[in-house]
Amino acid sequence: MSNALLYVITVLIWGSTWFAIEFQLGTVAPEVSIVYRYVGATSLLFTWAGIRGLKLRFAFRDHLWFMLLGVLLFGLNYVLAYRAQIHITSGLSAIAFSTMVWMNILNARLFFGIRVEGRVLLGALLGIAGILTLFLPQISELALTDSLLFGSLLAIMGALVASFGNMASQAAQHRKLPVIQSNAWGMFYGMLFSASIAAAQQQTFNFEWSVSYVSSLAYLSLFGSVFAFGAYLTLLGRIGAHRAGYAMVLFPVVALILSTLFEGLRLDATLLIGTLLVLTGNVLVLKKDLTGWPLARVVPGTSSPDSVNDGRVQARAHTGR
């Protein structure tokens, strides 16, 4: 797939998962719901890998990377995100999670020495300004109660953990660990991590058989975990964490579009201006990839761009040129 298609898949699916998570909160503890989510996701991924004859046996040091991915990207990140949405709305949670844009930029500089360009910072600034414009009316009506403050802190901590997970994933791909198997094993270890938290808290592993819970669980397992993570982590390995992570800014925009179509949200000037700011910032951040380089093309039988484009992307990622 091209980078553009991977980007669209990531944004559309993850933009809708904020709404789906709402149906997971209530009867079943969040950590238990996460376990169920990854039971389905890992089953699908391991089955798919087996059908395709992909390698599933790895060295112990590779499993250490999978464990790190599991704890950061598929475990603690989601525990914090689910817990946050008990205290705050999905919109506020999306705003807090969009801070991962900045975290990815700073962490990519810290861990990989990637130079931060002024254009990237300007694009991120416009994106954050757009998010604030979109949600400012909602924020202005809320007081920072203890519950709201606690939920916001949980969401920001989740974004920070996810950013560290992005760095671990990018490092794992530099070690030539395949995306599909990394996701499968990472989700497996994330499932074990979430199960251990649930067990430590003596939570009941009950199940809700309502249509809303089962259907949202199936959507989160198949699309939110398998398809979106595969697309996003592949994109992360190609164009770097700070650019791939900017997809986080568009998630609330997708949520607004869904709300307009299905919940009767009224289109107004604030909504249109905020959306325009986000999209403009997005173009600025990705401008070099969309115009300066051809979008990555995949050679059949591989998971990396063609040799010419791959060389240019890797040079930029490691040296900042």
Image (cartoon, rainbow, N blue to C red):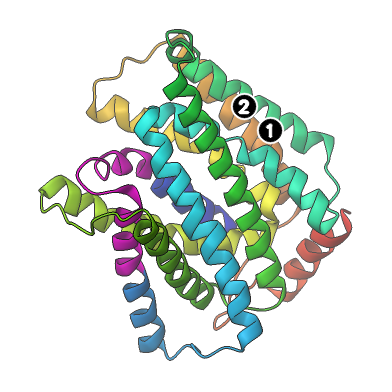
Residue assigned mark 2:
128
Residue 3 left/right relative to 85:
right
Residue ID at (47%, 38%): 251
The local crowd at label 2, few if under 14, some if 14 to 19, many if 20 or more residues have their Cα within 10 Å, is many
Of 200 and 313, which appears nearest the observer?
Answer: 200
* Magenta segment main secondary structure: helix
The answer to whether any part of residue 37 appears in the image is yes
Residue ID at (39%, 43%): 82
Q: CA distance from mark 1 to mark 2?
A: 6 Å
Q: Which label number is shown at residue 143?
A: none
Q: Quadrant of residue 130?
A: top right
Residue assigned mark 1:
124
Label 2: state its secondary structure.
helix
Q: Which residues are magenta?
A: 16-41
**In the figure, 160 relative to 241: above or below?**
above
Mark 1 in CB contact with mark 2 (< 8 angstroms): yes
Please state the horizontal and vertical placement of residue 62, each as a whole percent of the image: 62, 81
**In the figure, 307 relative to 309: above or below?**
below
